[in-house]
Image: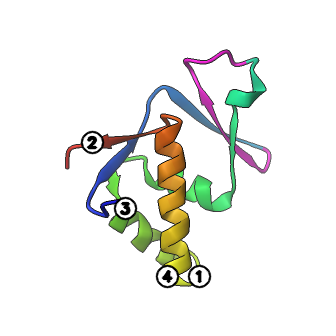
C-alpha cells in the first residue's frame, strides 16, 4: 500500500452509531441481507470518522497515534488491513490527491 494514496468514503455506504455499535450499510445491497452490514470496532469507527474528508494513510496514521497509545508498527499494520478490507468491499475509494 502506498502511504501517499488518498482515500475517501464511498457515499453509497451509510455509517451509523447504534447504542455502542458502529455499523456500515451499503445502499446498493438488500438491507435485509445481514451479510451486507459491517460492524466497526472503536478503532475502525475512529478511522471512518477521520475520513469525513479525503485523507492519506499517513494522515490517518498520525491521527491514530495521537488518539491511541499503541505500538506504531502494530498500528500501521492494522491501518493497512482496515484500508485494504474497506477498499475490497467498496466502502473506501482511492482518489486523486
In the current view of this chain or complex, which residue is farthest to the left?
97
Residue 80, image x, y percentages: 47, 61
- Asked which quadrant contains residue 42, the reply is bottom right
Q: Earlier in the sequence, mark 3 or mark 2?
A: 3
Label whose residue precedes the other's in the sequence (3 or 4): 3
| Dot 1 alpha-carbon crowd within 10 angstroms: few under 14, some 14 to 19, many 20 or more | few
Colour setting: rainbow
Relative to 81, does residue 67 appear above or below in the rendering? below
Please name the residue that numbered disc 2 is placed on: 95
Which of the two labelled residues, at mark 3 and mark 1, occupies the earlier sequence position? 3
Instruction: Name which residue lies at 56% across and 58% down.
Output: 46
Residue at screen point 48% across, 25% down: 12
Which is nearer the N-term, disc 2 or disc 1?
A: 1
State the image coordinates of residue 93 (x, y, percent, origin top left). 38, 39
- Residue that lies at the very extreme toward the right in this rendered image: 19
Q: Which residues are magenta?
A: 19-31
Residues at marks 4 and 1 touching, judged by CB atoms closer than 8 Å: yes
> In this figure, which residue is indicated by the disc labeled 4?
72
Examine the rendered structure and indicate whether residue 73 appears above or below residue 78: below
Q: Which residue is at a point 69% across and 56% down the rendered structure image?
A: 41
Element under disc 3: helix
Q: Is 33 left, or right, of 83 in this rendering?
A: right
Pointer 3 residue? 57
Residue 54 can be seen, yes or no: no
Q: Image quarter for residue 70?
A: bottom right
94 above or below 44?
above
Where residue 14 sits in the image (x, y, percent)?
57, 31
Amino acid at each position: 500500500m502506498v502511504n501517499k494514496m488518498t482515500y475517501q468514503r464511498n457515499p453509497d455506504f451509510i455509517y451509523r452509531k447504534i447504542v455502542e455499535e458502529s455499523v456500515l450499510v451499503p445502499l446498493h445491497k438488500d438491507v435485509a441481507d445481514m451479510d451486507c452490514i459491517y460492524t466497526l470496532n472503536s478503532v475502525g469507527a475512529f478511522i471512518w470518522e477521520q475520513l469525513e474528508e479525503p485523507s492519506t494513510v499517513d494522515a490517518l496514521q498520525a491521527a491514530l497515534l495521537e488518539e491511541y497509545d499503541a505500538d506504531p508498527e502494530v498500528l500501521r499494520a492494522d491501518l493497512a488491513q482496515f484500508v485494504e478490507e474497506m477498499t475490497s468491499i467498496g466502502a473506501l475509494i482511492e482518489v486523486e490527491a
